[in-house]
Amino acid sequence: MIVINAESLLERFVRLAEIPSPSGHEDAVAREAMDMLRGLGVTSERDEAGNVFARVEGVGEPVLLTAHLDTVTPADHVVAVIRDGVVYSDGTSVLGADDKSGVAIIIEVLDALRGLQHRPLEVLFTVQEEIGLLGAGAFDVSRLSSRIGIGLDANGPWGNVIVSAPGQNSLRAVMHGKASHAGVAPEAGINAIRVAAEAIVAMPLGRIDSETTSNIGVIEGGKATNIVPDTVILQGEARSRNADKLQAQTETMVDALKKAAADAGATVDVEVKPAYAAYVLAEDSAAVQFVCAGARGVGIEPQLTAGGGGSDANIFCAAGIETIQLSTGMAGFHTCEEYIRIEDMVQSARIVAQSLVAD
């Protein structure tokens, strides 16, 4: 029987969580993760992007285990508070369960499997996931022998298995109006902020349908209250699990910007970049069946779920590595009310460990 040590898992998670690691500043937490691996006799390395990579010998076909090291902000000073079997932040920062719970679970699983016969493992802790899957995108996937992967970067109850996720297009627009004195000659100017606002109002945003979302998340512009602003920068995104819907939503957003500019006598430069492609794993796919068997092996009925956000699994699936995301139990992530139940982490670790025991 595979034993997951709840105390050890909790201790590892808290140590990782209390090391600040906003995207682009993962060095300290990467060193800690590598030290934890070294303590298990596992040698790891960092690639040029900063990702941590390790191999563990085993029997049979290899499996990729992956989670990301970075967190969103605020995360300058993380204090974990443990109460009634739940780990919270102290309310002044994110906790970082997204995704240090995944990192801790993977390391705990490696510990639990020592001395047991299990699949060969490729362990990858990525950086800068939160700002566009940059670490996974920079990793040389030709180094991976695995054709299936388990990511530990999802929410929901234990046994929640993410089998599909949307693709994303990133949008950046620069609206060009005309500067003028706001008090003396406002009519001589073209207010770029107002034009951008009219474009935003004309866009369908938020939940478009069950597969599609969109958002304008960043607006920058203006120099002073007495100057009609001549430039404003917008950044947004469209996501969908359906490629045709993603294209249609992106075009709708771009058309709204162009029409608003034309109507006001302004101009707009729009740049659209595909961030990552959608993926869908069938219920009978190797990765899904692999994880479902592990869940059922510990008495948990898996729940196959469609995801609403992108993750490193998008990158690996596009590279031909069928990768599911398994819930770690994280909740309230991307907020200062983030928390995670210890039992959720333990149960997720049990599913992963059972999946990896060689046939």
Image (cartoon, rainbow, N blue to C red):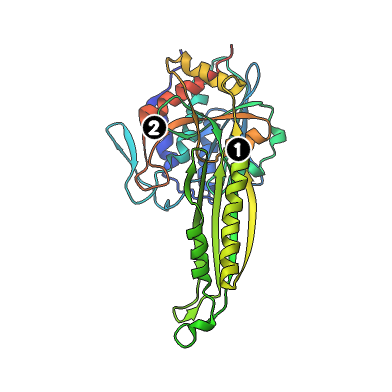
Q: Residues within 10 Å of mark 2 (few under 14, many from 20)?
A: many
How far is disc 2 from disc 1 in space, using C-alphas? 33 Å
Q: Position of residue 52 (x, y in %)?
A: 59, 39
Q: Is residue 351 above or below residue 16?
A: above
Kindly identify the residue that appears in the image at 39 percent across and 38 percent down. 331
Can you tell which of label 2 and label 1 is closer to the viewer? 1
In the image, taking residue 173 as reference, residue 308 lies left or right, namely left
Kindly identify the residue that appears in the image at 62 percent across and 36 percent down. 53
Looking at this view, is 183 or 114 the one in front?
183
Q: Which residue is mark 2?
A: 10
- The amino acid type found where label 2 is placed reads Leu
Residue 119 visible: yes
In the image, taking residue 255 as reference, residue 157 lies left or right, namely left
Kindly identify the residue that appears in the image at 44 percent across and 31 percent down. 328
Q: Quadrant of the C terminus?
A: top right
Q: Position of residue 245 (x, y in %)?
A: 59, 42
**Going by the picture, which residue comes out furthest to the front?**
263
**Going by the picture, which residue comes out furthest to the left?**
84
In the image, taking residue 3 as reference, residue 234 lies left or right, namely right
Q: Position of residue 34 (x, y in %)?
A: 55, 37
> Tag 1, which secondary structure?
loop
Looking at this view, is 199 or 132 the one in front?
199
Looking at this view, is 169 or 41 the one in front?
169
Residue 354 visible: no
Q: Which residue is mark 1?
A: 278
